Image (cartoon, grey):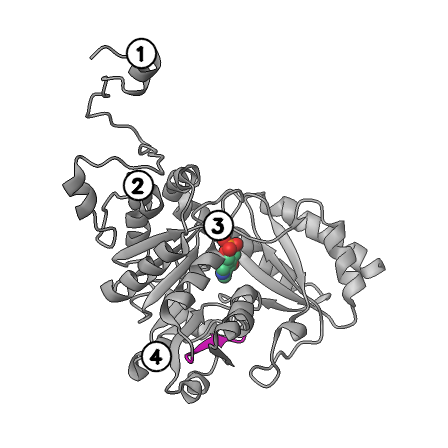
Amino acid sequence: MSLDLTTHLIHHPYEPEPGFAAPQPAVHKASTVFFRNTAAMRGADRRRKHVYSYGLHGTPTTFLLEERLAALEGGEHCVLVPSGLAAITLVSLALLAQGDEVLVPDNAYDPNKAFSAETLARWGIGCQLYDPMDPDDLASRIGPRTRLVWLEAPGSVTMEFPDLTALAAVCRARGVPSALDNTWGAGLAFQPFEAGVDLSVHALTKYPSGGGDVLMGSVVTRDAALHARVKAMRASLGLGVGVNDVETVLRSLPSMDLRYRAQDRNARALTDWLARRPEIVQVLHPARPDSPGHAHWQALCGPEGLAAGLFSVVFDARYGTAQVDAFCDALKLFKLGYSWGGPVSLVVPYDIASMRDPAVTDWPHGGVLVRLSLGFEAVADLRADLEQALQVLGSA
Ligand SMILES: *Cc1c(COP(=O)(O)O)cnc(C)c1O
C-alpha cells in the first residue's frame, strides 16, 4: 500500500528500540489508547489493576506514580486525582449515600469540614464534628448511620496531635471505615496503616510536588474492596490527572525525604527562637513538649521523630488583627500564601475562634494565630525577617 506523505508520517513504521534506560521514567500521554483487536477492546476491564483502556483510567506513567505512592504510605493500592481536596471529596462520595453520616474532627482541614457539613447535606448525608483529642467523644458520636470517620494528625492549622491509633481503633471496633488526611505525615513521619487507618489521603500538592506549582491528590489503601469503590467513583466522576503534572511529581519524589527533613530542621530552629519572644504566648508544633498532643506525636513518630516544616504561633491578645496583619505585611522573605512543602516560606493569619464549634472543642487562646510554613531559605535570614516584622508589630 503506497501512502500519502501525511498518512505515512502518522503511521510511520519506526518503533524506538526497547531497552532505553535513564533516571526519569517515560511520560506517556494519551486520551486514546489502542487495542490489539476487538477481543482485547471488549476484554479490557478497567476495574482490574494496570489495564489500559482509556487515558482517563490510567497510563504507564500514572500507574507508576500510583505504585510508588502506595509503597511510600505502606499501602497496596492508590488512585490519583486532580487535587488534595478532590481526594477528600472522592473518598466521601465513594463511601457515603443518602441517609448516612460522616464524622469529621473539629480541627480538620477547613474545606473538608465545609464539604462534609454543607455540600453533602444536599444529598441527605449528615455530618457531626468530634473532638479529635478525645477518643471517647468520637466513640459516643458513632451511630448506626455512621459510614465514614475522617482523621487528621495533626490538625493542619492548630497542630494538636491526636492519639491516632486510639481513634482508628474506635472506628475498627465499630466497623466504620476511617480515612486519614495524611498530608502532614506525607508517608515519612509515620506509617498510616500501622496506626490502623483504612484509607490515607494525601495532598501531593505539598511535599511530593515540592515546588508550589502542582495540584494533585492521592487515595491509598490496603483494602481491595475499599480501593474498588474509590476507583469506581473516580471513573464515574471523570477525574483524571495531567501527565505533565505526574511527571513533575515523579521527578520530585526521590528528594522528598531530604526536603522534608530540611524543612523540619528549619521549622524547629525557628520555633525555639519564637517561643522566647514576648509577643508570642504559644508556639504550636507537635515536637514541643508544651504543644497539645506532644506525647501522641512522640508515641507515633518516635522520640527523635520527624515533623513537617509547619507550625503556628499565637500572638499575645494585646495585639489585635490589624497589628498582626501589619506583622505579616512587613515580612519580606515569608510570603502571604496558602500551601506548604515548596521552596518559599509562607505565612497565613487565621481567626481560629470562627473556625471552631465551641460545643465540640475548646480554643483556649484569645490572640490571633499565624501559621508559618518553612521553605529552604537560610534560618538566619528567616529569623532576621521575623525579627524586623516583630518590631513593626510592636509599633503598629
Ligand atoms: C493542602 C491540603 C489539602 C488540599 O490539597 P489541595 O491539593 O490544595 O486541594 C488537604 N488537606 C491538607 C491537610 C492540606 O494541607
Q: Quadrant of the C terminus?
A: bottom right
Q: Position of residue 269 (x, y in %)?
A: 56, 55
Q: Is residue 235 magenta?
A: no
**Do labels 2 and 4 touch, CB within 8 Å?**
no
Tell me: 35 left or right of 168.
left
What residue type is disc 4 on? Answer: Cys
The secondary element bearing badge 4 is classed as helix
| Earlier residue among tags 4 and 1 | 1
What residue type is disc 2 on? Answer: Thr
The secondary element bearing badge 2 is classed as loop
Q: Which residue is mark 1?
A: 4
| Earlier residue among tags 2 and 1 | 1
Question: What's the CA distance linking mark 3 and mark 4?
Answer: 28 Å
**Do labels 4 and 1 touch, CB within 8 Å?**
no
Q: Is mark 3 within 8 Å of ligand 1?
A: yes
Q: Is residue 105 magenta?
A: yes
Q: Main secondary structure of the magenta part?
A: strand
> Which disc number belongs to residue 171?
4
Q: Position of residue 201 (x, y in %)?
A: 40, 60
Quarter of the image holding residue 241?
top left
Q: Quadrant of the N terminus?
A: top left
Q: Is mark 2 within 8 Å of ligand 1?
A: no
Q: Which residues are magenta?
A: 99-106
The residue lying at 51 percent from left, 66 percent from top is 112
| Earlier residue among tags 1 and 3 | 1
Q: Which residue is mark 2?
A: 59
